[in-house]
Image (cartoon, rainbow, N blue to C red):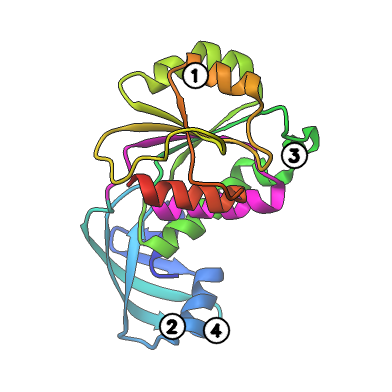
Amino acid sequence: MNLLLLEEADFIAADRVVLADRRFTHMQEIHRVAVGDTLRVGRIGGLMGQAVVLRLEGHEAELSVSFDLPPPAKLPLTLVLALPRPKMLRRVFQTVATMGVPKVILVNSYRVEKSFWQTPFLEPEAIREQLILGLEQTRDTVLPEVIIEKRFKPFVEDRLPAISAGTLGLVGHPGQYPACPRGLNEPVTLAIGPEGGWIPYEIDLLGKAGLSPVQLGERILRVETAVTALLARLF
């Protein structure tokens, strides 16, 4: 935890917070704080700054907080992602938050198993928990927006063209396609498929919506690896 993220419910005054959950445990067991120590803090959706430990008791800590730093800029990216396996989904949420993705759209695909949509990891609170872990790691305060689109064809045909308009539309997909570009300074709409890749029909629909296939080489990557590799290469 490189940044202590604060919720509105933590505040007992404009410049005071009380913590009594996993963050308090982390302060004790990892940071080993004492009264008078300082910590990096951020207000969810707001600025970052510093906290001074005012009081430590067996079950809670009181901190004085001040905020004066903006969070880091997000990537100019909309990520369209075929729903990964539930266990992988949690890691992907942390990754996109850590790497500064502002918007993630989870979509269906022919190779996405129907059971994946029943996972409790898609519940709003479960999504938020993983995104916060990513923000804590990277020192950011702004939660990515997560949109769920369970019907691939209506989304790609009716909504994706407007989303990708004015951006460089790309589809990460193995095959005889151009190499993924590097070091871009323009907005991108990027679609990444399931581990088995998009089927030809899906590639065709994505192409009609303005997204062109690109590849990273011959190796077939796990979704979480492909997300990291593509974002690092693009930006």
Q: Nearer the viewer, mark 4 or mark 1?
A: 1
Contact? badges 2 and 3 (CB < 8 Å): no
Q: CA distance from mark 4 to mark 3?
A: 41 Å
Task: Tell me the kind of residue under disc 4.
Answer: Gly
Task: Tell me the kind of residue under disc 3.
Answer: Phe
Task: Look at the image and tell me whether residue 160 can be seen.
Answer: yes
Question: Which quadrant does the N terminus fall into?
Answer: bottom left
Considering the numbered disc 1 on the image, is that residue within a helix, a strand or a loop? helix
Residue 66: image location, x then y, percent: 24, 64
Which residue carries the number 3 mark? 116
- Determine the residue positioned at 36% across, 44% down: 234
Residue 67 vs residue 17: left or right?
left
Task: Tell me the kind of residue under disc 2.
Answer: His
Q: Is residue 141 above or below residue 56?
A: above
Q: Earlier in the sequence, mark 4 or mark 2?
A: 2
Q: CA distance from mark 4 to mark 1?
A: 58 Å
Residue 31: give its label. Answer: 2
Magenta residues (range): 73-99
Residue 100 vs residue 160: left or right?
left
Which residue carries the number 4 mark? 58
Residue 226 or residue 93, whichever sits in front: 226
Residue 142 or residue 84, whichever sits in front: 84
Q: CA distance from mark 2 to mark 3?
A: 37 Å
Contact? badges 4 and 3 (CB < 8 Å): no
- Determine the residue positioned at 37% across, 37% down: 77
Residue 153 or residue 33, whichever sits in front: 153
Contact? badges 4 and 1 (CB < 8 Å): no
Q: Earlier in the sequence, mark 2 or mark 3?
A: 2
Residue 207: give its label. Answer: 1
What crowding class fits label 4: few (fewer than 14 Cα within 10 Å), some (14-19), or many (20 or more)? few
Q: Earlier in the sequence, mark 4 or mark 1?
A: 4
